[in-house]
Image: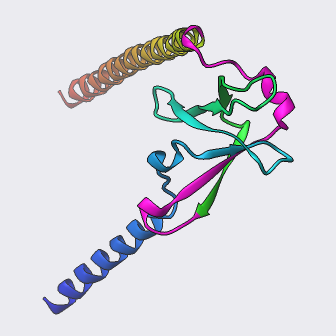
Amino acid sequence: MKRIRAASIAVVLCGAMGAAQAADNLYSMKALMDAKVVAKGDSATVGEVGNVIVDQGMTISGLVIDMDHGVAAVGGHSLFVARGQFWVQTEREGALDQVQYVVHLNEPIAAAAHYPQADESWWQSAKGAAGAVWHKTKSTAGSAWDETKAATGRAFDATKDATKNVFDSIREKMQ
């Protein structure tokens, strides 16, 4: 009984340690909202995160950056910056309410003019495109599932028939 208790305690402790290690790889969306944004080669803030855009699988697709008014060509606009076009630096670690981030654009601010402007028209277009991709993926997955079920059914029926034939053959030989 003592061994079982000791093993149970060890499992609980290992589980708690695993949970603590998993927390090291978690990030706060609340802290990411309003994070300052800097462009490559510049330490001055060019804007702040206005929104985090996620897809159907809850994966970050990109950020909407509210650009400062003084930024040439894009000042005062909200721009969509796709995942892979930025990286996030953790400024201070500690308790969840103390974490702060800085978003770094992978390009200088002059290149920001090619980022899509995140307005109502962009939002409707992006939602429509994402919905079409999701629908196609869902249809393909559904079709693959139907084909797999049908193939499995055919394999089962063939195995059942072959087994019946073997049993019939054995029964005939035994008579």
Please count the marks in the image. Answer: 0
Residue 103's place in the image compared with 77, above or below, is below
| Residue found farthest to the left | 1
Q: Where does the N terminus fall, quadrant-wise?
A: bottom left
Quarter of the image for the C terminus: give it.
Answer: top left
Q: Is residue 128 above or below residue 58?
A: above
Classify residue 106 by image quadrant: top right
Q: In the image, which residues are magenta?
A: 92-121
Which residue is at a point 82% across and 44% down the rendered structure image? 40
- Left or right position of 42 against 159: right
Q: Is residue 68 covered in magenta? A: no
Q: Compared with residue 89, is residue 173 higher up or lower down, i.e. above or below?
A: above
Q: Which image quarter: residue 20?
A: bottom left
Could you say where residue 35 lies in the image, as x and y percent from the top left?
58, 46
Q: Which residue is at a point 38% across and 14% down the rendered structure image?
A: 150
- Is 41 left or right of 127, judged from the image as shown? right
Q: Residue furthest front?
A: 70
- Residue 169, image quadrant: top left
Q: Toward the viewer: 113 or 145?
A: 113
Q: How is the image coloured?
A: rainbow
Image spot of residue 149 (x, y percent): 37, 19
- Residue 97 falls within the magenta-colored stretch: yes
User: Residue lying farthest bottom?
Assistant: 2
Relative to residue 10, is residue 144 drawn left or right? right
Q: Residue at x 61, y 19 (%)?
A: 118
2 vs 80: above or below: below
Q: Residue at x 47, y 11 (%)?
A: 135
Is 33 situated left or right of 101 in this image? Answer: left
